Image: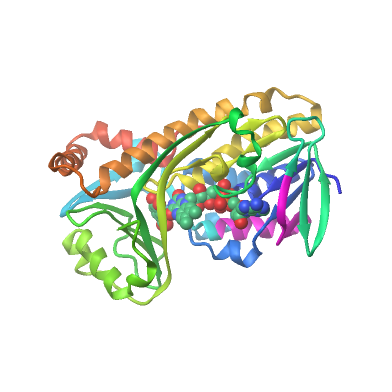
Amino acid sequence: MKTDVAIIGGGPSGLLLSQLLNKAGVATVVLERATRDRVLSRIRAGVLEAGTVQMLREAGVGDRLDREGHPHEGCFLTDDDLMVRINFKELTGTSVMVYGQTEVTTDLYAAQDAMGATILHGVEDVVIQDADSTAPYVEYTLDGVRTRLDCAYVAGCDGFHGVSRKTIPEDKRREFERVYPFGWLGVLSRTKPAHEELIYANSSNGFALASMRSDTLSRYYVQVPLTDKLEEWSDERFWTMLKTCLPSDVGGNMETGPSIEKSIAPLRSFVSEPLRWGRLFLVGDSAHIVPPTGAKGLNLAVSDVHYLYQALIDAVKKGDTAGIDTYSDRALMRIWKAMRFSWQMTTMLHRFDGEDSFASQMRKSTLRHLSQSETARRDLAENYIGLPF
Ligand code: FAD
Ligand code: DHB
């Protein structure tokens, strides 16, 4: 088998890249380990930056997003009962869109199917060969049959645990990492959201986030120790904890109900540099992970695609390699800024076990400063709605 670009991973970054390349007449094959149902059942991100929305429109998957997505012109940061509104619209002139990652992925699959794109599910034992040569190829097993896929380029869109990053020899990459001593316990429920806008809550009881997918579907998170197991968190225990973290008039009046999804995600900051080795390019979570505070993970994956897709089109169609030669540097410049913001939001809003007495005062003081300084709020808003590509 032969294609222009072999794409490892059919998550948001792989599907979006494939969609944009196919639209420009560049052939792709997407190799995805999981079933489509499995990919679509992973409840993850919920907030799209304006630039992400624009990219999805450009890819031809903006219609349902524009119809069903919920524009948010602000969000709240709270410290016990102090509520600070960050007015994105007033401070930056733009807003974000609440639209779940599952919906983005659903739309991309539909568009790819309509275009007749090749997406193979259930592939196993993917091996990327000769990526540092001019004739790379990918081997994989599907239904027990080992196949060779020849290609001009390989896009590693296979997430943090994929094979792409590990294909780059250790002496050719540098990794930067911070692991946080807590995770987020997330719950999805068919309940009215606690508030019309997202609430990022710092509290004496730890961090919580009140988010949503629609007027009848809520997404909540609370900070938990990494050692906690899902079985230890009944719905009742979750709701009790959430309510103690949110401002009392929000927590006291919110609707609760049975969880329809519950999971624990660890928090990590991670970057692997560079994003290119020969004809292999890393995109999205395969190259970097941010802690979820600030909603940057999915948005960063889309921004990598922004920097890569035109470069690949130029390389495949015109033999012009200027774009692919600078992809890594251009993408990393923005990645590090989002890394800094996500780390800052995480530090500002979470309680760290064993922290000194000074730490909680710093968090309180930061929140108070935000409540009083428009300059501080503007800085946060600019980063939250997404820095320019
Ligand atoms: P992924 O979505 O990870 O997609 C990679 C794909 O590659 C997967 O479909 C996987 O099955 C496939 N794959 C992996 N290995 C192989 C292989 N060897 N061969 C073939 N295919 C392979 N971001 C936020 O902004 N907010 C959140 O609340 C949030 N919550 C998250 C919760 C969890 C548990 C995780 C893991 C991430 C979360 N994120 C969140 C981050 C966000 O979801 C990711 O940044 C985003 O999914 C990145 O997209 P991606 O396509 O690069 O990677
Ligand atoms: C959601 C997740 C986030 O990490 C975030 O910062 C905002 C919203 C969500 O799942 O809705």
Q: Look at the image and say whether residue 105 sits in the magenta stretch.
A: yes
Q: Taking the image as drawn, is residue 10 in sight? A: no
Residue 152 appears left or right of 32? right
Q: Look at the image and say whether residue 304 sits in the magenta stretch.
A: no
Q: Quadrant of residue 65?
A: bottom right
The residue lying toward the viewer, choosing from 177 and 256, is 177
Q: Quadrant of residue 115?
A: bottom right
Q: Quadrant of residue 366?
A: top left
User: Where does the image place residue 160, in percent across and percent down from the top left?
Assistant: 54, 47
Q: Taking the image as drawn, is residue 273 in sight? A: yes
The residue lying toward the viewer, choosing from 164 and 387, is 164
Please identify the residue farthest to the bottom as the structure is shown: 258
User: Where does the image place residue 195, in percent across and percent down from the top left?
Assistant: 29, 61
Magenta part of the protein: which range? 103-127
Residue at 27% across, 37% down: 377
Residue at 16% across, 62% down: 248
Depicted 340 relative to depicted 143: above or below: above
Depicted 182 relative to depicted 24: above or below: below
Please identify the residue farthest to the right as the structure is shown: 1
User: Where does the image place residue 34, in percent across and percent down from the top left?
Assistant: 64, 61
Coloring applied to the structure: rainbow
